[in-house]
Amino acid sequence: MGWIGIAASALLAAAATSGTTVAETEITAAAEEAATEILQMQEERYRRMTVPVTINGQGPYRFLIDTGAQATVLSHALADELQLTNRDTATLIGMASRREVQTAVLDEITFGTRSNYSATAALVEGSNIGGADGILGLDTLQDRRVLLDFENRVIEIAHEDEQRSNRGYEIVVRAQRIDGQLIIARARVDGVRTAVIVDTGAQGSIGNAQLDDRMRRARQAMNSEMTDINGVQATGLVRVARKLEMGRAELTNFPISFSESPTFAAMGLDDEPAMILGMNELRLFERVAIDFPSRRVLFDLPDNARLPPQDAFGILGP
């Protein structure tokens, strides 16, 4: 089977450092309220989030929302429970490995009030996805806006045929769409032009070798260890970035883990500086919306957010 699933994130562990981020803002306004489905957010043990999903009319089951994964993923345990016996094989690309895995066809996968049909899902060990039952990847998200409301602990999902509003967001960043993936192409990390992927399935931020080469003068923290979706462990160096600029939005003093990874090559980003922006950084915002149809990423800061002192990582204060 020629299908390749990129589940680049879904990490069990990322850099063990105390660094995270804060932001500055630009004001953006628009006109209409979005029609949405609201799903209650649950945090799983690695501080990502799950939503209730039904498969072939059964469930609900706990699925991660992963804007960095190309394909839907199921745990082996859930596939066995659902008696999905029509199996095939595919290559699954993780942060540390490429592995041939089994796949299964889902007649119907439903979250909110809408369904996808005849979806192909890769099968992995549940322990490799933080104990969740599965992952919703880009194949089920690419025609929708996904809003992560950290303050109210809900996820709102707006469909392509519904009106969506940018009202209330303090930062709106345009992105390019490559093979369904939204990439902020004009970002800069410590002055280095860098492609940034906003990834709700990654615990922390991860950089490629090209970015590592350009950041060798950055402050070093410690080594990192991570386990990818295939259960393969990788170690790497952590560097603390002084500033990430995405348009007029700025994130300061946050750790980036560097390790050789096939993920960036699979996205065509192995020859230029690139990084995955993970949940440790995203959750410092009040809201983050990833709008695939309009190719925009929207951010909203807490009302009392301010820039911290240079060495006070990840602090939001009055």
Image: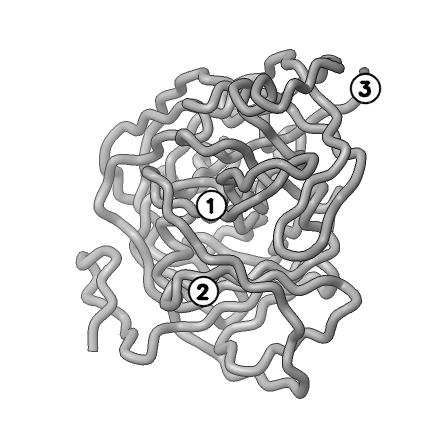
- What residue is at 30 percent from the left and 45 percent from the top? 240
The earlier-in-sequence mark between 1 and 3 is 3
The earlier-in-sequence mark between 2 and 3 is 3
Q: Amino acid at mark 2?
A: Asp
Q: Is residue 158 above or below residue 62?
A: below
Can you tell which quarter of the image residue 87 is in? top right
Q: CA distance from mark 2 to mark 3?
A: 37 Å
Question: CB under 8 Å between callouts 2 and 3?
Answer: no
Q: Is residue 226 above or below residue 110?
A: above
Please tell me the numbered disc located at residue 149: 2
Q: Which residue is mark 1?
A: 50
- What residue is at 56 percent from the left and 36 percent from the top? 135
Q: Residues within 10 Å of mark 2 (few under 14, many from 20)?
A: some
The N terminus appears in which quarter of the rendering? top right
In this rendered view, identify the residue nearer to me: 217 or 237.
237
SS of the residue at dot 2? strand
Please tell me the numbered disc located at residue 25: none
Q: CA distance from mark 1 to mark 3?
A: 29 Å
In this rendered view, identify the residue nearer to me: 311 or 122.
122
